Image: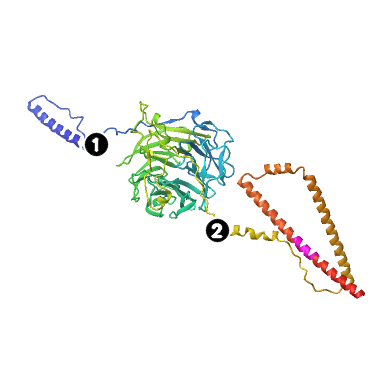
């Protein structure tokens, strides 16, 4: 407005000068063509000042990438990659069950084909996330309806890992997404295709709360800065803000009109939410919402007409949002501001190869000497490679830049699980990027139930089920009604007695054969024992097969034992009858 007033003043001066010229009072003329513009067009104020205007993406060289990885081809909308300052984990393709690969961060180059993997799931792995407070603990969820926690030793895996720390059962269908709490220890939230969200206390292996407020499949979930709220997107096209401890929906609203998946992320502690989705005409959009009012967005803008789902990644320290589409080759990034238009477009990283998924490293793993503010790990869709991409602010000095690296989230919990469950909230503990902080790498103690707890009934009754095997069979010598002896009965009794003798002889011969065979096998017993040790089951599946086989053998032995006992009783009864008949025959003969 000041410029417009100046222009009006100059125009008035020009009019006075023109009058003076007409009167012949002087030749002083002012050119007003540069400032005589309509007031409504004076909106341009110059280039917006920002230290992130020239951020660019720098992909790693070939020797800095991870090659020869069988990346999963699952159609689920997941990242399939998780990174921390020690390890990079990638979900891999496998014929049966579900596996993911864990590599030390410095172990770049071509990967061995038979590298060790985590192979404990019975279905495809859908999501993996590292514990923010322990760099050796990773959580995974799978198509087998379970969430598992694993401990990775410092040097990486030497063999296939099948022993999990904790196995969490609660979902009735496959589990699609998991998320760690940003400031409370051992709090994990999972979202399944049974439309349920479960808040877990993994330290005790139990569910804190089951949230049942979604009528359809959950597409994404995200914690706010202090972990007091969770935002979710759902197939019913609604965006929700939920209080996870009580499971109450604080606000909800329609986010994007398209039918494809929407993603949401909290913009730190600003009280706003960023969503990505599709319009009614299948154009990709982003929108910014206030968490207290989801009836209409603060701003909604169209991006392009591509078909891949957009994943948002928010960096709270630099307040930059990165948007990367599945199947795209580019990564767009925007700067978040506290007033309209709420987001300012900065630039985009262009690449010719499409991406199947993206992982990112926490800020404490970035290289401050290169002015690196963010680092992606791109899973290529057309070749088995994981490529690091560094987002760099160009600076001439190689000194530590205080304005680029404010204090970031430290790998130390601000709350215990019980404090958070009781209602306490706290922002993450901060650390200096210049000095760093020590990271815990210990293996946590697995929760074990107390010994006084009663076991299930089936285990209690196991001793009673097979108690009869240890008891001696006592024959029953009670008298039986005697029938009159006839010629036919005498013949049958004599035949039975001869059969009984034959059976006794047969059993005696078998016993002698067994004893002789045992004597012959005495020398080779040690070799057979070694073979049995080599053939002993080593995996959980082999143990289950061996257990079921032994159960079948026990059933067969028990059936044979009952049949033999029944036959012995019949033979004993026949012997008693024969003795009585012989006595009566002697009496009659006398």
Tell me where the magenta segment starts and ends, as one range. Answer: 563-571
Q: Residue sitting at 74 percent across and 44 percent down?
A: 525
Q: Secondary structure at mark 2?
A: loop
At mark 1, the secondary structure is helix
Where is residue 528 shown, x and y percent of the image? 73, 43
Q: Along the line of sight, which residue is nearer the eye, 202 or 51?
A: 202
Label 1 Cα neighbours within 10 Å, binned few <14 / some 14-19 / many ≥20: few
Q: Is residue 8 above or below residue 189?
A: above
Which of the two residues, 150 or 376, is positioned nearer the viewer here? Answer: 150
Image point (80%, 47%), residue name: 517
Q: Is residue 111 magenta?
A: no
Q: Position of residue 139 (x, y in %)?
A: 49, 44
Earlier residue among tags 1 and 2: 1
Residue 385 position within the rendered picture, expressed as x and y whole percent measured from the top left: 51, 34
Q: Position of residue 144 (x, y in %)?
A: 54, 49
Mark 1 or mark 2: which is in front? 2
Farthest top residue in view = 27
């Amino acid at each position: 407005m000041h410029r417009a007033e100046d222009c009006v003043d100059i125009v008035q001066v020009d009019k006075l000068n023109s009058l003076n010229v007409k009167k012949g009072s002087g030749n002083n003329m002012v050119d007003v063509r540069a400032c005589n513009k309509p007031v409504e067009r004076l909106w341009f104020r110059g280039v917006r000042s920002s230290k992130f205007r020239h951020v660019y993406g720098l992909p790693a060289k070939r020797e800095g990438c991870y090659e020869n990885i069988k990346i999963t081809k699952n159609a689920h909308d997941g990242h399939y990659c998780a990174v921390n300052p020690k390890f990079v984990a990638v979900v891999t393709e496998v014929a049966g069950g579900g596996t993911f690969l864990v590599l030390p961060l410095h172990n770049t180059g071509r990967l061995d084909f038979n590298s060790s993997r985590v192979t404990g799931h019975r279905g495809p792995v859908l999501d993996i996330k590292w514990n923010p407070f322990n760099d050796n603990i990773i959580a995974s969820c799978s198509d087998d309806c379970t969430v598992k926690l694993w401990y990775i030793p410092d040097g990486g895996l030497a063999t296939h890992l099948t022993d999990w720390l904790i196995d969490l059962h609660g979902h009735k269908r496959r589990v699609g997404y998991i998320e760690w709490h940003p400031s409370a220890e051992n709090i994990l939230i999972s979202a399944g295709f049974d439309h349920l969200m479960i808040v877990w206390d993994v330290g005790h292996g139990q569910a804190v709360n089951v949230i049942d407020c979604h009528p359809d499949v959950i597409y994404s979930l995200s914690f706010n800065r202090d972990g007091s709220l969770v935002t979710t997107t759902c197939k019913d096209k609604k965006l929700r803000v939920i209080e996870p401890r009580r499971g109450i929906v604080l606000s909800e609203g329609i986010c994007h009109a398209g039918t494809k998946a929407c993603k949401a992320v909290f913009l730190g502690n600003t009280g706003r939410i960023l969503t990505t989705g599709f319009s009614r005409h299948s154009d990709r959009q982003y929108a910014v919402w206030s968490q207290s009012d989801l009836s209409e967005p603060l701003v909604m803008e169209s991006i392009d007409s591509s078909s891949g789902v957009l994943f948002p990644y928010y960096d709270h320290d630099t307040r930059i949002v990165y948007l990367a589409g599945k199947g795209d080759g580019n990564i767009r990034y925007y700067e978040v501001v506290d007033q309209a238009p709420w987001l300012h477009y900065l630039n985009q990283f262009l690449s010719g190869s499409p991406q199947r998924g993206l992982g990112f490293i926490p800020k404490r793993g970035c290289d401050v000497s290169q002015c690196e503010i963010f680092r992606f790990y791109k899973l290529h869709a057309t070749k088995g490679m994981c490529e690091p991409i560094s987002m760099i602010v160009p600076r001439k000095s190689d000194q530590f830049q205080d304005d680029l690296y404010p204090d970031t989230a430290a790998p130390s919990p601000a709350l215990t699980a019980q404090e958070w469950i009781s209602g306490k909230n706290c922002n993450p503990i901060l650390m200096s990027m210049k000095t760093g902080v020590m990271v815990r790498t210990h293996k946590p103690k697995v929760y074990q139930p107390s010994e006084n707890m009663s076991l299930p009934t089936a285990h209690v009754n196991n001793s009673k089920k097979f108690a009869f095997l240890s008891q001696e069979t006592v024959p029953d010598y009670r008298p039986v009604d005697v029938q009159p002896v006839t010629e036919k009965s005498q013949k049958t009794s004599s035949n039975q007695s001869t059969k009984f003798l034959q059976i006794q002889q047969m059993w005696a011969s078998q016993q002698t054969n067994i004893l002789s065979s045992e004597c012959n096998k005495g020398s080779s017993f040690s070799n057979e024992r070694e073979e049995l040790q080599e053939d002993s089951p080593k995996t959980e599946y082999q143990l289950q097969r061996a257990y079921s086989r032994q159960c079948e053998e026990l059933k067969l032995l028990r059936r044979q034992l009952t049949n033999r006992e029944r036959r012995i009783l019949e033979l004993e009864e026949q012997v008693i009858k024969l003795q009585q008949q012989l006595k009566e025959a002697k009496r009659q003969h006398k």
